[in-house]
């Protein structure tokens, strides 16, 4: 009988010892290694990208439709990518991604210049957003709206794989319609967060504006023809 009670006590002890409610001892924490961003390598790769775009765009001089797609792909997938994380400043005008600050207007003109578009980077960047839109977009036209809903209705009527320039009350950036969503790519002044890509109707900068001026950049065939021929 004593042996029977001993076995019962032992089983209760073991079950308590292995109870899932008991927190297991923590493993020793490992140090977090921070990898320093290699600015020089980033800039070198960016210059290589610019050279590659200049060489390859000549292949599309006689193929305007393919050239338009190439323009979209290089600006959206490559040029913008290198600028992500570049910090914002009202007076920022760096021409080097991830080195220095860049204001919203300079982000627009600098990225297009780096694509090979012929423009006056400083002069155009200092103009009102509506002027930038009219200068760079289809037929010099700028559509004007007073609500996000009307802006999105305009975009819903546009083709996929297009890039637009959007001017707000005191801000300017690109809108990308890539077939999955509408994105706002810009150097964001809010929180001085700098260059980012965000869903259009989730952007605080978009929501803060009362007016919207937009035009189709990649649909400007005159600009594209000049770009392909240079």
Image (spheres, rainbow, N blue to C red):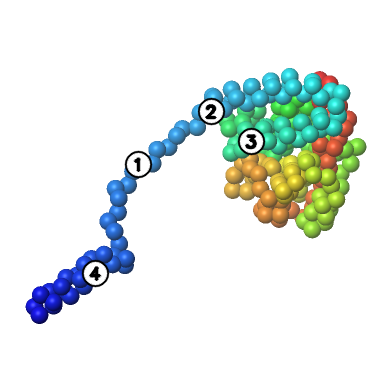
Query: Mark 3 — residue?
Result: 81
Which mark lies nearer to you, 1 or 4?
4
Label whose residue precedes the other's in the sequence (1 or 4): 4
Query: Mark 4 — residue?
Result: 16
Alpha carbon of mark 2 to alpha carbon of mark 4: how far? 56 Å
Label whose residue precedes the other's in the sequence (3 or 4): 4
Identify the mark at residue 224; answer none if there is no mark. none
Label whose residue precedes the other's in the sequence (3 or 2): 2
Label whose residue precedes the other's in the sequence (2 or 4): 4
| Disc 3, SS | helix
Is any atom of residue 222 visible in this view?
Answer: yes
Label whose residue precedes the other's in the sequence (1 or 2): 1
Q: Residue at x 29, y 59 (%)?
A: 24
**For this view, does 27 lie left or right of residue 217?**
left
Query: Mark 1 — residue?
Result: 31
Quarter of the view holding residue 67: top right
Q: Is residue 166 above or below residue 9?
A: above
**For this view, does 229 lie left or right of residue 170?**
right
Q: Residue at x 26, y 64 (%)?
A: 18
Please state which of residues 109 and 176 is positioned toward the viewer in this rendering.
176
Alpha carbon of mark 1 to alpha carbon of mark 3: how far? 30 Å
Quarter of the view holding residue 138: top right
Q: Residue at x 20, y 71 (%)?
A: 11
| Disc 2, SS | helix
Residue 220 drawn at (x, y percent): 86, 35
Residue 127 drawn at (x, y percent): 78, 37
Query: Mark 2 — residue?
Result: 39
Instruction: Sort mark 2 into few (<14), some (14-19) or many (20+) by Cα contacts within 10 Å.
Output: few
């Amino acid at each position: 009988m004593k042996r029977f009670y001993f076995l019962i006590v032992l089983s209760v002890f073991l079950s308590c010892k292995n109870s899932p409610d008991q927190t297991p001892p923590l493993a020793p924490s490992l140090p977090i290694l921070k990898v320093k961003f290699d600015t020089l390598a980033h800039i070198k790769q960016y210059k290589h990208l610019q050279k590659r775009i200049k060489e390859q765009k000549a292949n599309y001089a006689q193929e305007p439709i393919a050239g338009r797609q190439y323009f979209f792909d290089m600006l959206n997938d490559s040029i913008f990518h290198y600028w992500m994380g570049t910090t914002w400043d009202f007076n920022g005008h760096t021409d080097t991604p991830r080195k220095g600050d860049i204001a919203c207007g300079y982000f627009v003109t600098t990225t297009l210049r780096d694509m090979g578009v012929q423009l006056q980077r400083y002069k155009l960047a200092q103009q009102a957003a509506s002027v930038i839109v009219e200068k760079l977009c289809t037929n010099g036209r700028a559509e004007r709206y007073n609500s996000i809903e009307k802006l999105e209705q305009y975009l819903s009527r546009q083709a996929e794989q297009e890039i637009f320039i959007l001017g707000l009350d005191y801000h300017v950036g690109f809108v990308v319609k890539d077939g999955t969503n509408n994105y706002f790519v810009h150097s964001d002044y809010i929180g001085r967060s700098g260059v980012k890509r965000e869903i259009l109707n989730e952007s605080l900068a978009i929501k803060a504006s009362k007016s919207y001026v937009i035009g189709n950049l990649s649909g400007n065939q005159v600009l594209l023809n000049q770009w392909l021929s240079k």
